[in-house]
Image (spheres, rainbow, N blue to C red):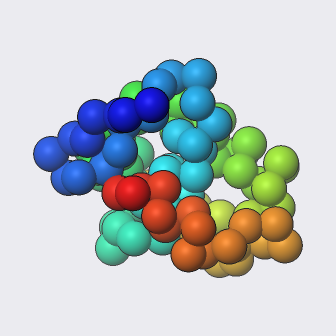
Amino acid sequence: MKCDRNEHGVIQYPHSDDRRLLVLLAAIDELERATLTTLAEFTGLNKGVIPRNVEILREQFGVEIEKDGPVYSLVSWGPLLKKGGVKKLLRG
């Protein structure tokens, strides 16, 4: 399946595709200031789903993501995910 890309070159996976979670994770790692607004703009995800998706990443994948004020930051990729593989999902 071929997916479109947004103006930032980020692959736009279908709404039911779990790779959207991993794109969010890669974006948190990549962006200098990962806020709801910058994450939504960069990834194409709706601002409303980002906090819940961060919780899913924590609970299901064991990643450590902190939030300091409005800024999310990745502390640890956890025991299951490989940074290189996740980052590939961002732009292919």
Q: Is residue 72 visible?
A: no
* Residue visible at 35% across and 34% down in the picture: 3
User: Residue placed at 37% from the left, 34% from the top?
Assistant: 2
User: Which residue shows up at 48% across the image and 55% down it?
Assistant: 89
Q: Residue 53 vs residue 10: left or right?
A: right
Say whether residue 37 is left or right of residue 61. Answer: left
Depicted 47 relative to depicted 41: above or below: above
The quadrant the N terminus occupies is top left
List x then y, in percent, for residue 91.
Answer: 35, 57
Give the percent coordinates (x, y) of residue 81: 73, 67
Pinpoint residue 7: horizontal percent, then vertical percent.
Answer: 15, 45
Q: Residue furthest left?
A: 7
Q: Is residue 33 left or right of residue 52?
A: left
Residue 61 lies, in percent from the top left, at 80, 56
In this view of the protein, which residue sits in the foreground, 69 or 38?
Answer: 38
Q: Quadrant of the C terminus?
A: bottom left
On screen, residue 73 above or below 8:
below
